[in-house]
């Protein structure tokens, strides 16, 4: 690769922007990032008031690089963006998966000499964090707390990263002229250009596909990703509640997938979510007309200024059940906002950082599987290594583009971190709610 080669990056989320920034730092001078909307993209998966930053993983690779990222989050660059907070990982005794996930985290932390504190029962958790007024995960609470964790204001982090890119000379194209509808390739499969909704064609030498949950509608993914909508709820707190819950820890129950963020000081919102199997969505006819691959689940394609204020009833019930578990006094409060946010799930929960099998100059960076945001400070480094075919063998193997699932009926069993009811397709009524 020459530093003057034209690099086209499709998608300005955490994968695309961190890659653009890294390549620009390495001296690449002709990088263009395209997106449906100006970043921070309001309905992009990397954008919201918050994202959890933790290095609690059973998987050694993610633990190591999440720790590397955590060290950066706590540095001066992110001081108005990253907020430290303790992290409680819990499960009940009935969920074998939930318990196994928790135990694999503590085993890996111990192995790496990283401190954590076992919570003997719900009462010991509650005496450590007295604002937790519910019964916590039951029956048979088990869990631990890690004080080295926190959350980031995701929109601010993405805005800063965008500005870092601009300062280093990266170009951006947004809106119709930034919305890619097709990769145009020659007879040998080499990509020459991207075609956009505006009708324009943008030529390049290297193409990076980092379009998140939308990516699988542009090129074949061989059944190696599935886009799933995940529920989010926001409750506006009073000043008294803000004060009382200021030190609320991040709490996740891996038996149900439910988790919360500490209150967000700027908006006074308490945000809660479910890390679950999620919902799939078939594209509508208008979307199908612009997408080369429309037999896959995908989020709405039209640029939007916000996520729709909607979540399916069963998802809302799960949001409430979790609230009742830790803060029952808020469990019947109406939500000020609901939303679906999109995961790009892979069968193993591993990212995809590899060349596409059909096109020698198309590189894929994605497959975030609901856990990629925390890697923002280091992700571009790994994508750049992949692009230059310099990734260490174990990482190249872990993040390879997998074609072996193409004939499997149901391969999306996850990484052991998901709780609750199985994935389902949104009903026609729910889809008509124009998610
Ligand atoms: C509800 C929720 C909670 C999460 N919580 C956490 C967490 O606490 N901690 C954590 O580490 N991770 C978390 N994640 C996961 C993390 O946010 C994602 O893994 C990550 O943001 C994915 O980044 P991405 O760049 O792949 O996707 P995106 O940020 O979605 O970026 C893809 C971009 O591509 C653009 N695009 C799409 N189609 C086109 C097209 N045709 N042409 C041009 N541009 C296009 C989109 O507009 C979008 O901006 C969460 C995710 C969700 C949804
Ligand atoms: C980027 O590539 C285009 C197309 O080849 C060229 O016109 C332009 O001068 C290049 N820009 C830089 C900064 O090299
Ligand atoms: C994977 O591919 C098979 C065969 O093409 C198909 O029947 C199946 O529905 C796909 N699975 C998913 C989850 O998309």
Image (tube, rainbow, N blue to C red):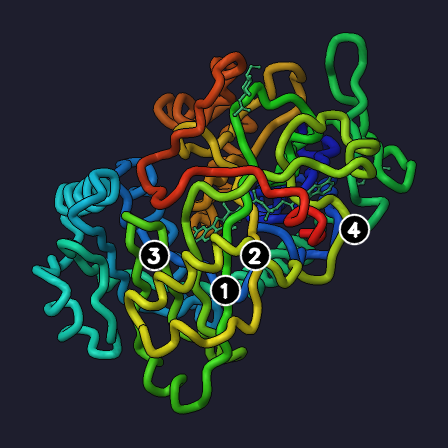
Assess mark 3: CB under 8 A from ligand 1?
Answer: no
Q: Nearer the viewer, residue 55 or 120?
A: 120
- Looking at the image, tell me whether mark 3 or mark 4 is earlier in sequence order: 3
- Looking at the image, tell me whether mark 2 or mark 3 is earlier in sequence order: 3
- Looking at the image, tell me whether mark 2 or mark 1 is earlier in sequence order: 1
Q: Nearer the viewer, mark 3 or mark 1?
A: 1
Task: Return the residue at label 2.
Answer: 311
The residue at 54%/36% (across/down) is 366
Q: Nearer the viewer, residue 310 or 342?
A: 310
Measure the alpha-carbon separation of dots 3 and 4: 32 Å
- Residue 44 x, y percent position in the rendering: 62, 51
Q: Are marks 3 and 4 in contact (CB under 8 Å)?
A: no
Q: Are marks 2 and 1 in contact (CB under 8 Å)?
A: yes
Say which mark, if any, is on residue 174: 4
Task: Return the residue at label 3.
Answer: 71
Q: Is residue 242 above or below residue 348?
A: below
Task: Return the residue at label 1.
Answer: 233
- Residue 431 x, y percent position in the rendering: 67, 46
- Residue 148 x, y percent position in the rendering: 26, 61
């Amino acid at each position: 690769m020459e530093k003057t080669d034209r690099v086209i990056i499709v998608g300005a989320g955490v994968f695309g922007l961190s890659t653009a920034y890294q390549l620009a730092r390495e001296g690449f001078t002709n990088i263009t990032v395209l997106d449906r909307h100006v970043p921070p993209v309001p309905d992009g998966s990397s954008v919201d008031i918050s994202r959890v930053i933790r290095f609690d993983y059973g998987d050694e690779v993610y633990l190591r690089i999440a720790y590397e990222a955590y060290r950066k989050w706590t540095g001066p660059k992110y001081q108005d963006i990253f907020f430290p907070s303790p992290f409680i990982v819990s499960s009940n005794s009935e969920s074998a998966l939930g318990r196994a996930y928790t135990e694999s985290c503590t085993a890996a932390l111990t192995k790496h000499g990283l401190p954590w504190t076992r919570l003997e029962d719900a009462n010991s958790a509650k005496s450590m964090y007295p604002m937790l007024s519910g019964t916590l995960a039951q029956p048979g609470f088990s869990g631990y707390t890690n004080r080295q964790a926190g959350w980031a204001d995701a929109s601010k982090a993405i805005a800063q990263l965008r500005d870092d890119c601009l300062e280093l000379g990266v170009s951006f194209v947004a809106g119709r002229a930034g919305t890619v509808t097709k990769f145009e390739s020659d007879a040998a499969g080499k990509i020459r250009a991207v075609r956009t909704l505006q009708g324009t064609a943008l030529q390049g030498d290297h193409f990076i596909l980092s379009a998140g949950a939308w990516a699988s509608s542009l090129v074949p993914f061989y059944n190696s990703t599935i886009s799933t909508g995940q529920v989010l709820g926001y409750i506006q707190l009073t000043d008294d509640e803000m004060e009382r819950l200021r030190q609320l820890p991040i709490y996740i129950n891996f038996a149900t997938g439910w988790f919360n963020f500490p209150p967000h000081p700027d908006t006074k919102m308490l945000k809660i979510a479910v890390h679950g199997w999620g919902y799939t969505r078939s594209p509508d006819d208008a979307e199908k007309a612009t997408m080369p691959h429309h037999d896959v689940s995908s989020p709405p394609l039209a640029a939007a200024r916000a996520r729709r204020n909607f979540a399916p009833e069963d998802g809302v019930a799960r949001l409430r059940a979790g609230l009742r578990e830790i803060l029952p006094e808020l469990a019947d409060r109406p939500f000020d906002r609901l939303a679906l946010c999109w995961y790009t799930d892979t069968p193993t929960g591993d990212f995809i950082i590899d060349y596409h099998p059909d096109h020698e100059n198309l590189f894929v960076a994605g497959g975030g599987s609901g856990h990629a945001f925390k890697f923002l400070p280091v992700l571009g480094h790994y994508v750049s290594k992949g692009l230059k075919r310099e990734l260490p063998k174990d990482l190249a193997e872990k993040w390879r583009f997998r074609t072996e699932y193409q004939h499997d009926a149901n391969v999306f069993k996850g990484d052991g971190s998901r709780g609750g009811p199985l994935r389902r397709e949104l009903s026609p009524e729910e889809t008509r709610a124009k998610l």
